[in-house]
Image (tube, grey):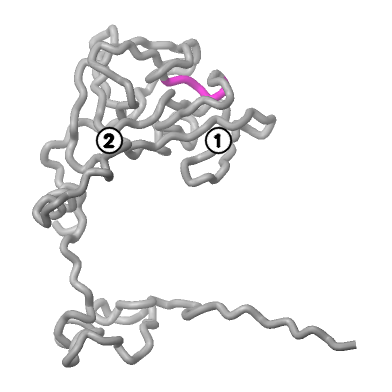
Amino acid sequence: MQYRSSKKGKVAPAKYPALPISETRRGNVTRLIDERGRSAPLAQITFDDREITYLPAVDGLYVGHEIEIGHKAEPRLGNILPLEKIPEGMRICNLERSVGDGGKLIRAAGGSAILFSKTPMGVLVKLPSGKMVALNVKCRAMIGEIAGSGRLEKPLLKAGAKYHAMKAKGRLYPRVRGMAMAAVHHPFGGGRHQHSIHKSKSTSKTAPPGAKVGNIASRKTGRSRKKRIKKRMF
């Protein structure tokens, strides 16, 4: 279906394995996988008991690299441990939003956060956007930066390459402007030229699907004009 990512070529979900907080496990990177629909490569981790899991690979990871998961793990590249055990100022990724969710934040290629400080209210983490968030000290994080940071520096060069990249993510491509369509295909279409629509773009939220385009149920549109303060003459 449209807007739905294809399941072809996908491996198991990439998340932290479910294990007690008091337990520490060791494993090795056995494969680095380029999965479709993901910006970052996946690392296949095989533990000592032969259990296999998949995690987003950090920059500098290689086949044979040893990884530790648990509160007794050392704070080095690729290891996963609670925030309370990670030194301040260290770069982290694949961060848990709540304890035990398997890693939800900072999983895109080239992403990393900084463990800013530890306070009685929780651990302050500076996200790539610059926003500061306070998280539980028991939330786990992976040490390092997600691999694939230079992915967007290489141009796609052809429309076909862009098409297949969008198809892997289930996104619509190419997108045609409504103004460029015929009047029967879009409310903004029609006319001898592709000029402005000459009417308001605001649309009711109860409009039918064919007419629900533009600014849907917008409270305010246009430029915000600052009020001019007139100085009083004394």
Local SS, label 1: strand
Q: Which residue is mark 2?
A: 40
Residue that appears at 20% across and 48% down: 155
| Residue 68 versus residue 147 in the image, above or below | above
Task: Look at the image and say whether residue 219 sits in the magenta stretch.
Answer: no
Q: Nearer the viewer, residue 144 or 229?
A: 229
Q: Which residue is mark 1?
A: 125
**Magenta stretch, residue numbers:** 80-84
Magenta stretch mostly in which secondary structure?
Answer: strand
Q: Position of residue 206 (x, y in %)?
A: 36, 80
Q: Is residue 51 visible?
A: no
Residue type beneath disc 2 = Ala
Q: Position of residue 6 (x, y in %)?
A: 15, 46
Residue that appears at 51% across and 79% down: 223
Q: Nearer the viewer, residue 204 or 227?
A: 227
How busy is the neighbourhood of tag 1: few (under 14 within 10 Å), some, or many (20 plus)? Answer: many
Q: Position of residue 76 (x, y in %)?
A: 44, 16
